[in-house]
Each structure stands twice: as structure tokens, then as C-alpha cells.
Image (tube, grey):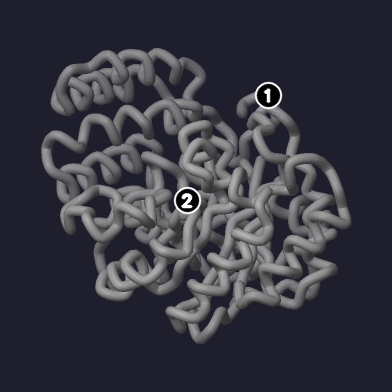
Amino acid sequence: MSSLKNVLTVRDVVLSPPVALAPMVGLSHSAMRSLIVRLGGAGLFFTEMLAAKHLPHENPLSPYIVRSSEESPLFYQIFINETECVPAALEVLHKLGADGVDINLGCPAPQVRRRGAGSFLAEDRNRVCDIVRELRAKTSLPLTAKIRLGRKLDRENLQDFSKMLEDEGVDLLSVHARIHGEKFCRRPRWQWVSYVTEHVRIPVLVNGGIFSVTDARKALELSGADGVMLGRGGVTQPLLFARIAREIFGCPLPIPSVSHAEIYWQFYDLLVARFAPERRLGRLKQYTPYFAANYAFGHSLATKVQKSKTIEEARDIAEEFFARNVPRDCADFSEEQR
């Protein structure tokens, strides 16, 4: 832990601190990213997963690609299964001002696997090699990849795959410490990420099961990673980024004096500002169950918001809930609260 740096540089892109928001469908959008920017502590953002094949036809106002200038550095994550998609997809990403390109090689979702992408693509090493090589040849942007530990626990295979990605031009790896298809209820294997960090020269971010500063510290110690990537834990507790940046990486960041209710309303206002009316309620419904975990009776808030017909109705439900409930009195989540 003493050797941890609070700044990483990836092809001239500075990550300060090396604490990232993970790419998550329906969650890692402009409103969430801006909320975390304002609370502080994140040095890298990823978009939601984008289909490389569809990028050339995406509406510029699509919630998948809308961004503000404050969301930086921002790496666009793509899922892809053929080299033919590379030139047109990169042309769009260059025009959008992407700070980097991330390849999804770990998503186990059936709809992604059916398209031959995500964790399915990771099992076809020759195709992965061709795609990475084509991407590297067509862009000077940082090229990163998000992977899992593999289809099964196989140290040699994990190391060979990681080294191949490095050799073909990947500049940074994010490693989710579970095998393909493994559920979130399975404890992450942070120790297995060390087999990657000891085998490659490029920076590595450890991901999976990080819900507290204690979790982050343990994940870094066991994995030997250079930084952390927060997924569900960061969405549930957006202040966790600032806590990790300050307490682990020594960044002189104050923890904002803001209540949980104020965080929710900041997110609500950002949704209204960034997205068309028909896009707002769905994103609020996806976020609320995570946020609600901060409250002993949060399931009530999540259930009622899920049943709401309009975002105004959801707002009224939340106002009533906050008037009657206080959040859990703890800085970090325990195992039982996840």
C-alpha cells in the first residue's frame, strides 16, 4: 500500500486519483458521472456499454452518449465482435471527444454473449487479438479493457490473456475479481487479480465488491493493483469516491457536507437537466434501489418509485420518504448491508 501513487498517466491522460466509476448499464450516464464529479474523488469515468456496430447511427442526444465538459477524463466502453466495426465506431468516438476507448471483455449478460461480445468474446483469443490490434492501429487514444478472471479459475490462462492484451496495445486493464457469469453474491477473489498485476507492466484497476474504504484498502493490498474501480458501491454511496481518494491515496479532499437526501435531489436535478422527459423516470428507477440501501426501510422507497407513473410522482414519493426517515448512521457499509 505504501507504494500506491495518487496519479497515474495513461498515454498522456492523467488519472488523479486512480479511482474510477465502472461502466454500468443504466447507471454510468451523464447525470451519475456529474454527480460524482461534484462530490469529488473520481479520477476516471466510463460510459455505459455501447454497441460499436450501432454507434454510427446513434442520436447525438442519446442518453448513452450525452456528456458535459465536467465529465473528464471519460473513456467510452464498447462491446464489439468484429474488426469491420472498428473504423466507423472510432470515427464517432473521435468526434465525440472521447478521452479513451474501453473494450468490454467481461460482461456475462446473455444478450451480449448472444452477440458474440463481452465474456463470450474473451473466450475467442484470436478474435480478441484481431480486434485489439485493429483498434490500436486506428486510434492514438488510450485503449483499455475490462475483463473478468476467466471462464474458470486458471492462473496461467488469466496471465496469458492479460499479457496478450498488453502486447497488442492495451494501456490499462480493469479486472473484475469474479469468473464469467458469477453472481454478485459471490465474494470477489481480489487475490486472483494479483496474478495479473505481477505479470503485466501496464496499470491495473481492481473491481468487484468494493463498498467501503476498508474494502478498497483490502482489495488493493490483496491484488497489488494501482487503483480501484467502483461499481454498485459507488452508486450506492457516491461519497465513497472522495473517502477513498482522501484516506487511501492521500488526496487533500474535503468530504462534502451533504445529506443523503441532498445527494438524491442533486441526481434528480441532473436527470432533468440532461435528458429528454421520456428518459428521466427510467434512469431514476434504476438508481433508486441502490440509493435506498442507505436507509433501514429503503425498500419502501425503491418499491414505490418503481411503481410511479411520472417523475413528478416519484419526486413526491421521495419527499415524503425523506421527511419520515433518516439514513443509516455509518460511514461504511458492512457485509450484511450489501
**For residue 336, which numbered disc appears in the image?**
1
Q: Residues within 10 Å of mark 1 (few under 14, many from 20)?
A: few
Residue 313 versus residue 105 in the image, above or below:
above
Q: Nearer the viewer, residue 108 or 9?
A: 108
Horizontal and vertical percent for residue 274? Answer: 19, 50
Q: Position of residue 38 (x, y in %)?
A: 35, 59
> Which residue type carries mark 1?
Glu
Q: Which is in the foreground here, disc 1 or disc 2?
A: 2
Q: Quadrant of the C terminus?
A: top right
Residue drawn at 41 percent across, 64 percent down: 84
332 horizontally vs 225: left or right? left
**Residue 316 shows up from this direction:** yes
Q: Residues within 10 Å of mark 2 (few under 14, many from 20)?
A: many
Tag 2: residue type?
Pro
Q: Is residue 213 visible?
A: no
Horizontal side of 7 relative to 75 (left or right) equals: right
* Distance in Å between CA atoms under marks 1 and 2: 25 Å
Residue lying at 78% horizontally and 66% vertically, measured from the top left: 197
Query: Which quadrant would the N terminus be assigned to in this image?
Result: bottom right
Return the residue found at the far bottom: 12
Residue 23 - label: 2
The quadrant holding residue 67 is bottom left
Q: Residue 204 at what x, y percent from top left?
A: 68, 66
Q: Secondary structure at mark 1?
A: helix
Labels 1 & 2 near each other (Cβ < 8 A): no
